Amino acid sequence: MIEYTLGHLMRVRGIVLDLRSLDFFGTEGFLALHRVSVCCARAGVSWVIVSGEAVSRVLRIGDPQASLPATRTVEAAIVTIQGRPPVEHRPASALNGSTR
């Protein structure tokens, strides 16, 4: 998931991660979402998680302040991304923290 998502950051305006069909979601998945969040912020790309029960449970525990963007439906995720103002895209070097 991470490699695919990060590989497409510079070509998209927003990312919707539909995780509703997952039966299990653990700490590795939660850490992956944080990595996606950091990389999207650096690239200036809006993103939203569509969470099912397994993901929602982990988000309630691991992200009680709801800092990760999450909705329950794809439709709500699309509205969320479309409702955000366009963001300035940064160079690919910004994704890995390079300052060149």
Image (cartoon, grey):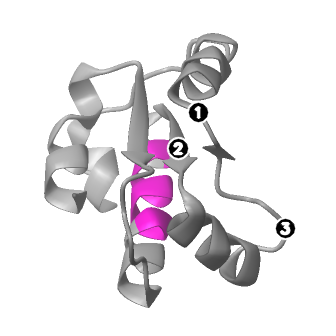
For the residues bearing labels 2 and 1, Cβ distance under 8 angstroms: yes
**At 38% from the left edge and 71% from the top edge, which residue is drawn?**
23
Which badge, 1 or 3, is on the more N-terminal residue?
A: 3
Residue 18 coordinates in the image, percent (x, y): 40, 43
- Judge the density around disc 3: few (<14), some (14-19), many (≥20) Cα neighbours within 10 Å: few
Left of 74 or right of it: where is 18? Answer: left
Which badge, 2 or 1, is on the more N-terminal residue?
A: 2
Is residue 98 visible in the rendered image? The answer is no
Q: Is residue 66 above or below residue 40?
A: below
Amino acid carrying mark 2 in the image: Val
Which badge, 2 or 3, is on the more N-terminal residue?
A: 2
Residue at the bottom extreme, as displayed = 27
Residue interval drawn in magenta: 33-41
Which label number is shown at residue 50?
Answer: 2
- Label 3 belongs to which residue? 65
For the residues bearing labels 2 and 3, Cβ distance under 8 angstroms: no
Q: Is residue 29 above or below residue 80?
A: below
Amino acid carrying mark 3 in the image: Gln
Which label lies toward us, 2 or 3?
A: 2
- Secondary structure under badge 1? loop
Residue at the right extreme, as displayed = 65
Amino acid carrying mark 1 in the image: Thr
Q: CA distance from mark 2 to mark 1?
A: 6 Å
Q: Quadrant of residue 83?
A: top right
- Label 1 belongs to which residue? 73
Residue 40 coordinates in the image, percent (x, y): 44, 44
Q: CA distance from mark 2 to mark 3?
A: 17 Å
